[in-house]
Amino acid sequence: MKNTTDILLVGVGGQGILTMASIIATAAMLDGNDVRMSEIHGMAQRGGTVFTEIRIGSKSSIIPPGRADIMIALEPAEALRYLHKLRRGGLVVINDQPIPPPIVYVQGLKYPETEEIISKIKEVTDNVYLIPATKIAEEKLGDPRPANVILIGFGLAKGFLGISEESVREAIKRVLRKKYVDINLKALEIGKELAHKNQGRTECFSNIPICICSRMRSMALIIGGTSTGKSRCNNLELR
């Protein structure tokens, strides 16, 4: 039986992946867990791909392919880049703000539509949450940077991170500089509120009706390579 919780955080440089990882790992340690966190991989410069791995209850810091229980993606296409790390039936939370890599512009490549990304992920799992965290952070906090903590708050309220709210709050105070603490505690609350709005899957949390992103179509993705996936096409449902 698997006694660890394996969390994969992915995005691009400048989105606060390391900060997010430090908050989650610190909270898990405050809860009394053994925690291992990998170093950031990839290009940490703004716009370059970045990921880090957190293993709660493990002696190893590296998550084997197909073993991650949870993937939180601050950039949609990066969720596809690291999809091979997710276990079948795992849980995915995606910030819907796209940041196309420079190669897309330089070589005139096609950046995948959000529905295409969801379609490809659904070949591995149906447990997908799509959240406009950057937009919400800008609208409610006047700053896009706390989008990462909004996603932590969402995961905290849903219960899949396996850490306590008290420890997350303390971790925010320990990890962040004092002048950033208040805004990120507010971001945490916003994420929790989003989680309580609906219990479904593949949802777009905003002021519009919940979008059940079930439309699937053929796709060709070129992200540091070429891969093609095919799936059925259903109607986009609104409720």
Image: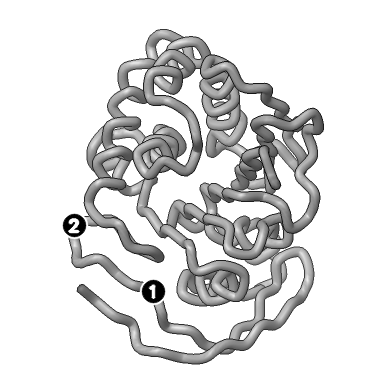
Q: Nearer the viewer, residue 128 or 80?
A: 128
Seen in the picture, residue 66 relative to 108 is either above or below; the reply is above
Three-letter residue code for mark 1: Cys
Seen in the picture, residue 89 relative to 144 is either above or below; the reply is below
Q: Which mark identifies residue 213?
A: 1
Q: Looking at the rendering, which quadrant does residue 225 occupy?
A: bottom right
Residue 217: give x, y in percent of width and height: 52, 87
Q: Residue at x 67, y 50 (%)?
A: 68
| Residue 224 in view here | yes
Q: Looking at the rendering, which quadrant does residue 145 occupy?
A: top left
| Residue 12 in view here | no
Q: Nearer the viewer, residue 37 or 10?
A: 37
* Badge 2 density bin: few <14, some 14–19, many ≥20, Cα 10 Å: few
* Badge 1 density bin: few <14, some 14–19, many ≥20, Cα 10 Å: many
Q: Which quadrant, please, contains the C terminus?
A: bottom left
Secondary structure type for disc 1: loop
Q: Which mark identifies residue 207?
A: 2
Three-letter residue code for mark 2: Asn
Residue 122: give x, y in percent of width and height: 54, 72
Residue 67: give x, y in percent of width and height: 72, 52
Q: Which is closer to the viewer, label 1 or label 2?
A: 1
**Label 1 vs 2, first from the N-terminus:** 2
Tell me how far mark 1 sits from mark 2, CA to CA. 16 Å
Q: Residue at x 37, y 44 (%)?
A: 158
Q: Looking at the rendering, which quadrant does residue 182 occupy?
A: top left
Q: Residue at x 25, y 56 (%)?
A: 198
Q: Residue at x 78, y 55 (%)?
A: 65
Left/right placement of residue 59 relative to residue 153 reads right
Left/right placement of residue 186 relative to residue 117 reads left
